[in-house]
Image: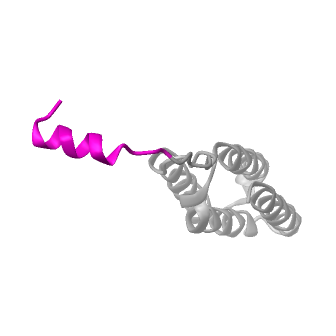
Amino acid sequence: MKKLTFLALTAMAAVLLAVSSCSPVSVSATFRIFVNEVEARCANYTAEDWAEANATCDRLMNEFKKKRITMSREEVREVQENLARFRELEANTPVQTERQPVEEVEVDVQGVENFLKGDR
């Protein structure tokens, strides 16, 4: 899951950055697509997935900073709103931990029954 998420985010960021380098308008669309993708998948993110998402967000923000001067107020506002959405998702989504196998536990049924009856 981690590698798949990492590869998906990296591929998406690479394509989106390539497209965004052609036109300043696409920076806002690129960021929106990225945040929508994170929103759709973040419920299952591990700490490593969030680290990758943050790295992608940082790359997109650097691209935004370079092109901000050529963008309209509406486009700038859209990027800022999507950044706020991303930060909210990051803050409000519990980080999934690695699932550990559960060890089987033997239960002393007779002991539990005796305890419940008051026999100790």
Does the stretch in magenta take in 111? Answer: yes
In-front residue for pair 21/53: 53
Q: Is residue 119 above or below residue 23?
A: above
- Chain part drawn in magenta: 105-120
Residue drawn 62% across the image and 54% down it: 45
Quadrant occupied by the N terminus:
bottom right
The quarter of the rendered structure image containing the C terminus is top left
The residue lying at 75 percent from left, 45 percent from top is 55
Q: Nearer the viewer, residue 12 or 74?
A: 12
Name the one closer to the observer, 2 or 115.
115
- Vertically, is 53 above or below 51? below
Query: Which image quadrant is residue 110 in?
Result: top left
Q: Residue at x 46, y 45 (%)?
A: 106
| Residue at the spot 64% in from the left edge and 43% down from the top edge | 47
Q: Residue furthest left?
A: 118
Locate residue 98 relative to residue 8 in the image: left or right.
left
Residue 73 in sight here: no
Q: Is residue 100 left or right of residue 16?
A: left
- In magenta segment, residue 113: yes
> Residue 32: x percent and y percent?
63, 66
Q: How many marks?
A: 0
- Residue 58 in the image, given as x and y percentages of width and height: 73, 44
Quadrant hosting residue 42: bottom right
Left or right placement of residue 103 versus residue 26 in this view: left
Q: Is residue 35 visible?
A: yes
In the depicted view, which residue is nearer to us: 60 or 7?
A: 7
Q: Quadrant of residue 62?
A: top right
